[in-house]
Image: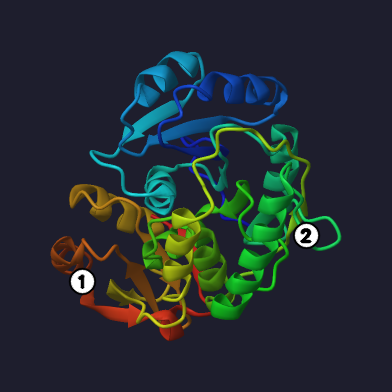
């Protein structure tokens, strides 16, 4: 079961990465709005503008102005969908997180059931696969998708029929752990997230979804696919290590949260273990980690996948 949410926090955080989506945000929100209105939960809507060159941030502010609570975060430059998703997860406050594309091509009516499925799994990825395959409007894209899925399996070992589905649900703690360890900024981030989830020993329960193949996707055959394959080849080959603060087992979570806030650390996770807890930080937070270690009476060092595997994760 997920940890009990902070009483001041939303129940669910819906993270929407957006790059040059000014023309599709309104239609996507029109698909989502009836679900939010009927959902018996407090849903925080987070739009991450990934350095768009159009009016994505302005349009997002207009479209979701009436959603309470909501947050719009902007990257100062285009970093990639993977980076945008990691940013959204870092600032999310709900005990459950759903990541969805701006066009809401995956039917948003699935979102409440996907969130509920997190009672039984750490990660609930949507799956558009029919008979093991995803079918697009254009046959060429369908064939390319099947080939790409085989490439994903080859390099990552992830055997799901649909790794690239735009809707995935996570418990916040495991989502933070994955996001902290991940490196890929581009569209291959989905495969890396699933690979890391498996390597951490997290439970994964695919969820069948219906969808509309909405025109205007920013993923294109050719150079986009080549870039994804280049990124896929790094999965499993890169050394995964992050700065951590080693603490006594069963360290009080509220105390850690207060210390992280004081040191302006965002998006950390507390990895619980039988002998010690590890406060996992981003690779950019090593300096702040020294201050956290002093404040919490811990020891700053690095830890990799082997040491984090099988732990429980509490979002800080």
Q: Quadrant of the N terminus?
A: bottom right
Q: Identify the residue at image location x=65%, y=59%.
A: 144
> Quadrant of the rendered structure where residue 22 is?
top left
Q: Where's residue 315, x and y in %?
A: 44, 56
For label 2, the crowd category at 10 Å Cα-Cα, with few meaning under 14, some 14 to 19 and many 20 or more, is some
Residue 227 showing in the rendered view: yes
Q: Residue furthest right?
A: 131
Which residue, given by chain and number where applicable, does mark 2 sit on? Answer: 133
Tell me the SS state at disc 1: loop
Dot 1: within a 10 Å radius of its alpha carbon, few (fewer than 14), some, or many (20 or more) residues?
A: few
Q: Position of residue 55 (x, y in %)?
A: 35, 21
Q: Residue at x 48, y 43 (%)?
A: 6
State how the image is colored.
rainbow
Q: Quadrant of the C terminus?
A: bottom left
Front one among 218 and 36: 218
Question: Which residue is rendered at x = 53% and y = 25% of the image?
Answer: 24
SS of the residue under disc 2? loop
Is 73 situated above or below 34?
below
Position of residue 80 measured from the top left corner of the image (x, y, whole percent) = 38, 49
Counting from the top left corner in percent of width and height, residue 50 is at 35, 39
Q: Nearer the viewer, residue 46 or 188?
A: 188
- What residue sits 42% from the left and 59% below the top? 179
Q: Which residue is mark 1?
A: 297
Q: Nearer the viewer, residue 30 or 173?
A: 30
Residue closest to the eye, 215 or 316: 215
């Amino acid at each position: 079961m997920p940890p009990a949410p902070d009483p001041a926090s939303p129940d669910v955080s819906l993270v929407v990465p957006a790059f040059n989506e000014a023309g599709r945000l309104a239609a996507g929100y029109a698909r989502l709005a009836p679900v939010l209105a009927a959902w018996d939960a407090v849903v925080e809507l987070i739009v991450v503008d990934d350095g768009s060159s159009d009016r994505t941030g302005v349009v997002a502010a207009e479209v979701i102005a009436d959603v309470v609570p909501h947050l719009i975060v902007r990257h100062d430059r285009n970093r990639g969908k993977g980076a945008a998703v990691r940013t959204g997860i870092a600032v999310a406050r709900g005990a459950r997180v759903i990541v969805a594309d701006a066009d809401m091509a995956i039917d948003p009516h699935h979102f409440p059931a996907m969130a509920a499925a997190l009672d039984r799994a750490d990660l609930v990825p949507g799956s558009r696969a029919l008979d093991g395959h995803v079918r697009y409007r254009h046959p060429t894209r369908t064939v390319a998708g099947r080939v790409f899925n085989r490439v994903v399996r080859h390099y990552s070992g992830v055997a799901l029929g649909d790794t690239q589905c735009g809707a995935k649900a996570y418990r916040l703690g495991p989502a933070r752990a994955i996001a902290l360890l991940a490196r890929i900024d581009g569209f291959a981030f989905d495969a890396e997230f699933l690979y890391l989830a498996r390597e951490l020993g997290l439970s994964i329960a695919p969820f069948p979804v219906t969808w509309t193949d909405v025109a205007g996707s920013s993923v294109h055959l050719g150079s986009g696919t080549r870039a994804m394959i280049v990124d896929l080849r790094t999965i499993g080959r890169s050394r995964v290590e992050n700065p951590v603060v080693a603490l006594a087992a069963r360290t009080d979570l509220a105390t850690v949260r207060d210390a992280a806030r004081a040191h302006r650390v965002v998006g950390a996770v507390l990895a619980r273990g039988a002998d010690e807890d590890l406060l996992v930080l981003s690779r950019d937070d090593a300096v702040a980690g020294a201050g956290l270690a002093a404040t919490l009476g811990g020891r700053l060092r690095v830890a990799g996948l082997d040491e984090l595997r099988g732990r429980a994760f509490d979002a800080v």
